[in-house]
Amino acid sequence: MSTTKTRTKPTRTTKPKPAAVWRNAFGQTEVSLNHPDAHVSAPARNCACRQCAVHRAWYCKRLVEHNVARLYEIRYPSGGCGRVAVGANATDEMRDLMEGED
């Protein structure tokens, strides 16, 4: 008859410290170097590696595109910039679809 010993899992006496998270000047989340998402899902704070630089560039690009879209919506609240010019060879059905019903 064989006896098997089972090990009990050690209990944790203290809670783990949460990893530090900051916002940079653009409002993007940056994490500490020992955070599990550092360099992979979010840029690490004060890091100049290529991955963190790409994360920051993508965020700035998204921010610029978002602001351009908001300005376009303010300038053209109806969702367009007016009538669409169609060529002389367009059919009447196509012209009605592109110009809209008046």
Image (cartoon, rainbow, N blue to C red):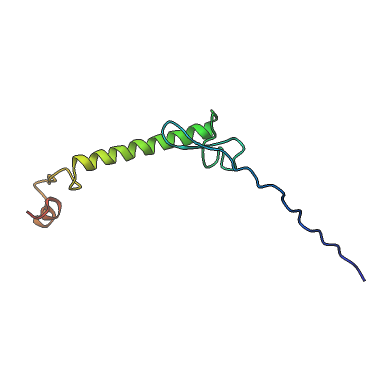
Task: Give the image location of residue 65, x and y in percent.
Answer: 33, 38
Q: Going by the picture, which residue comes out furthest to the left?
A: 102
Q: Nearer the viewer, residue 37 or 85?
A: 37
Q: Going by the picture, which residue comes out furthest to the front?
A: 13
Task: Give the image location of residue 22, x and y in percent.
Answer: 50, 36
- In this rendering, the count of numbered labels is 0
Seen in the image, is 62 located left or right of residue 14?
Answer: left
Task: Please name the residue shown 19% across and 45% down the image.
Answer: 77
Seen in the image, is 9 located left or right of residue 93?
Answer: right
Seen in the image, is 56 located left or right of residue 8?
Answer: left
Seen in the image, is 23 located left or right of residue 96?
Answer: right
Q: Nearer the viewer, residue 18 or 6?
A: 18
Task: Please name the residue shown 11% across and 57% down the image.
Answer: 93
The C terminus - image quarter: bottom left
Task: Give the image location of residue 64, x and y in percent.
Answer: 34, 35
Task: Judge whether 17 appears above or below 48 on screen.
Answer: below
Task: Judge whether 4 appears above or below 17 on screen.
Answer: below
Task: Judge whether 38 appears above or below 8 on screen.
Answer: above
The N terminus - image quarter: bottom right
Q: Going by the picture, which residue comes out furthest to the bottom?
A: 1
